Amino acid sequence: MSDAGACADRLWDAVVVGDEHGAADVVVKAVESGLDAETVLLDVIGAVQRRVGVEWAANRLTVAQEHAATAINDRVIGVLTTVAERPVPHRERITVACVDGEWHALPARLLAEVLKLRGFRVDFLGAQVPAPHLITHLHSTGPDAVALSSSIPTRLPTAHATITACQAAGVPVLAGGSAFGPDGRFARLLGADLWAPDARSAAELLASGPLPRPRNGHQPIDDLPHLGDQEYTMVSRTGTQLVKAVYTGLEELFPVMRTYTDLQRQYTAEDLAHIVEFFATSLYTDDDSLFLGFLSWTAEILGARGVPPHFLPPALRLLAAELRDFPRATRLLDRARVELTTTLDDGPAA
């Protein structure tokens, strides 16, 4: 096992039990033993954070444990910055920010620290940065590029507007994070100037040569002409009503739902809201894989928590009935229902 791998195991053992001092000690000793700070950031702290996500999805960590582990990792980064050598800033100025509504700030912070270690001047703005505030910052500081991070695909419409606004301000945008797809397809679709799959790649891209000039006079609909059919707008604006209609229909199909506790009702409504949000985002991007992948992931998450996902196909059928006048919406919902039913091995489509 590599030194980084061994350190990651020790850091995991500390964060999973909430031992902040032990976690900080692992990082300090890693640097003292000769591991460079970038390796500690990405192959120790970053690796542990990825494992936190995997363990939460498998229901081996609670939400509280996941939050605690993430908070410790964030504070451990602060410890690392006090013991690692940092070069004098001599490269371009980069603004690093999360899309508005994106609260997973740790990936963006890891990138910000890597860029600092490589000599960039960095403004790290943190999580959930509203586009108007970001643009004000760009005008006041004049960075050479914006690194925009998002992990949640449902933030893609907001990311699109933010990318366009940054470019209108004369600043090119590098997009990163799992929301943009493992191959960067959504970064390209939304017109980002650059995309990187990870912090190392992002730093190398930014250091590799002159940054591209952003597009001028561009509007979001120029990238996505299918939005002219207004189906995305309809679904996103009526999301609350759609959730209520589907919930009512499910109660008729599954009378046991009428005996649910308030907490069970809340969780079910939240699950339906997530389905509608991801569905709307697929309509925005006109990419079926986004919604289909979310449904598959949701079925796995529910299964890991001992919740039968049998309500999902009927929920899709009910949603399709509400949107029967919208051809793109009904086509996607019918496809999703058939594929999900097959995956769940529940016999004919519900």
Image (cartoon, grey):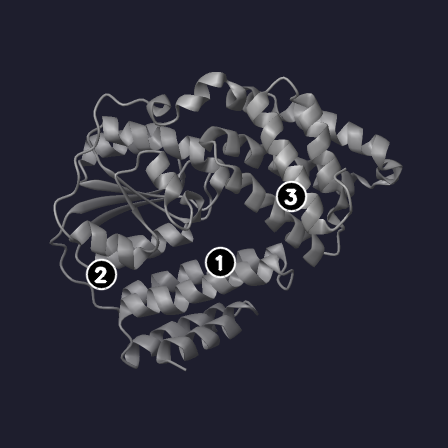
Q: Report the Cα–Cα distance between label 2 and label 3.
A: 46 Å
Report whether 225 appears left or right of 192.
right
Badge 1 is on which residue? 70
The residue where tag 2 is placed is: 117
Percent position of residue 101, x then y: 47, 37
**What residue type is disc 1 on?**
Thr
**Is label 3 in a helix, a strand or a loop?**
helix
Up/down of 245 relative to 343, above or below: above
Where residue 146 appears, as percent x and y from the top left, is 26, 41
Type of the residue with mark 3: Glu
Picture residue at 35% right of the left edge, 40% below the top: 187
Spatial CA distance of label 3 from label 1 is 35 Å
Above or below: residue 336 compared with residue 87: above
Query: Label 1 crowding class (10 Å Cα cut-off): few <14, some 14-19, many 20+?
Result: many
- Vertical order, 63 against 157 (above or below): below
Q: Amino acid at mark 2?
A: Leu
Instruction: Of the two numbered discs 2 and 3 on the same chain, state the one appearing first in sequence.
Output: 2
Q: Which mark is residue 339?
A: 3
Q: Quadrant of residue 254?
A: top right
